[in-house]
Amino acid sequence: MNSFANLVSSLSPLTLFIVVIGAIVVLFLARESAHAAINSLFRAVYRSLRLAATSLRQAANQLRSRNRDVLLHHGRLQVEHDLAKEFAEISSFVQRDLGGYPHIQNQIQQQITLIQDDYERSGQVAAPLPEWVEAVEAVAKLRKQGSTTNINTSILEQIHNAAELQHKENLKQVRELSTERHKILRGMTASWRKLVGSVDSTGASLKEIVRRSERIDSHMQRFNAIVDATPAAERALFSSALCQFAIAALVTAIAIGGAFFNFHLIALPMSEMVGSLHRVAGIRVADIAALVIICLEVTAGIFLLESLRITRLFPLIGSMDNRMRRLIMAGAAATLIILAGTEAALAFMRDQIAGDMASLRASLAGGETLAAQEGINSWIPLGANMILGFVLPLALTMAAIPLEYLLQTGRSVFGSLLEWGLRTLATVIRMLAGISMQISKLIIALYDLVIALPVWIEASIKKMHFSPKQNTDAEWHTHDTTPANPLSAKE
């Protein structure tokens, strides 16, 4: 750059003027070729950018279709799992609560039969004895003779006494029968209560079946919407996946914080066990050993939850027979307990190491008060460290559940973000393609601006060359406008 400036400054004004004029003339002569080259270059850039934008948009569409298929597949699997769970629950409910329905039906029939028998028994009433009525009729038919009057009177008195006695006996019998009927009717109350209880229990069971059937209907509607791939189902699945991803990410972050705390809890005693001077790739071997223990705890927790069929990160474990799953479950649980006990021992060792280091610092400083205070409160941090060392590995076991949700929903969430990024990049590239065309026009305009004087001279010459012909054509048009018919002209 300096050499070019020195070269320009070394030229005389006349030479510089001649060079500038020569450059303008050369640029003017190469005007059409330069325009074609500029247009070709920027047209190639424009087409390349448009092709790249089209490719990115097609990739975004393919990614959207794939994300949609994955989202619908996971949603269909979830709904199928919910339906299978509902059907299993309603099957067990029917077997448990409605399996004894024939027995309940027999009890109801027996109660109805017993109530009917008691009702018939309560309706039976003893008829009055008619002997004294027939005797009165026989006496009334006797002839009225004087000698027989006294006899009739005595007979009627005896009949009257017998009738009163019979009336009292019948009244007593009726009262006894009424009391017995009341007792029978009172005894029917228990049967009615049993019958009502049986009917109510059956009705409650049927209501529960209806409620579960409504839940199955709602799941079936969701399943049909997912199979039909409706936009509403897709939006609902994406919203659910986004919420689950956020919750799983939060819980996973909490688990990572717990693992970080657990790492610092066992890092110091591990340095005493494996040494603190050895390093691998700049990292202390003690830190690597602590990380290995934490990873083993998380792995044992994952295998434990997989064998319990709580998570499905490894479908092979869930598809094993019960014997193999129990063996894996026992091995994972034993490994987890051993590692938790090891961490509790390391926490105890850490407290001892911290106490020894504090005593060493106090002795070097020449003080004894700190050691006395630590002796008083030494069991509180020791117990807390040992409890945390045993509990944290068990708590990290549950990290497999949010990890599974994070992996399942992360595919859809990150796929959607990547799709949005591709579409945004395609839009930016299309804008750059349009800008490139405008830049080509700007460069051509600047090129013409540099050679504006020759271009103006060329335009003036062309104007002067075409002006006589234009005047001749104008005169011809003027003469041609004379009407062929004079009458029409006069008119």
Image: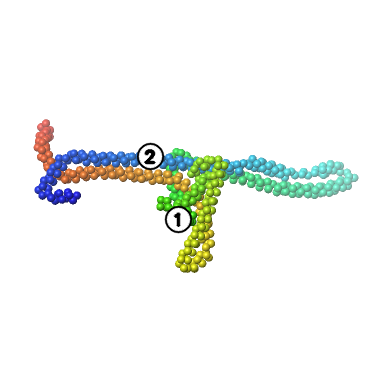
As rendered, which of 354 and 263 lies closer to the eye? 354
**In the figure, 373 relative to 418: above or below?**
below
Dot 1 falls on a residue whose secondary structure is loop
Which residue is rendered at x = 43% and y = 47% of the image?
242
Which residue is rendered at x = 45% and y = 45% of the image?
407
**10 Å crowding of disc 2: few (<14), some (14-19), many (20+):** few
Q: Earlier in the sequence, mark 2 or mark 1?
A: 2
Amino acid type, callout 1: Ser
Q: Quadrant of residue 49?
A: top left
Q: Is residue 214 visible?
A: no
Q: Quadrant of the C terminus?
A: top left
Q: Is residue 480 left or right of residue 45?
A: left
Image position, residue 465 (x, y; %): 10, 38
Residue at image mark 1: 276
Q: Is residue 56 visible?
A: yes
Residue at image mark 2: 62
Dot 2 falls on a residue whose secondary structure is helix
Which residue is rendered at x = 50% and y = 58% of the image?
350
As rendered, which of 145 and 136 lies closer to the eye? 136
Report the Cα–Cα distance between label 2 and label 1: 53 Å
Amino acid type, callout 2: Gln
Image position, residue 313 (x, y; %): 48, 44
Q: Is residue 13 left or right of residue 393?
A: left
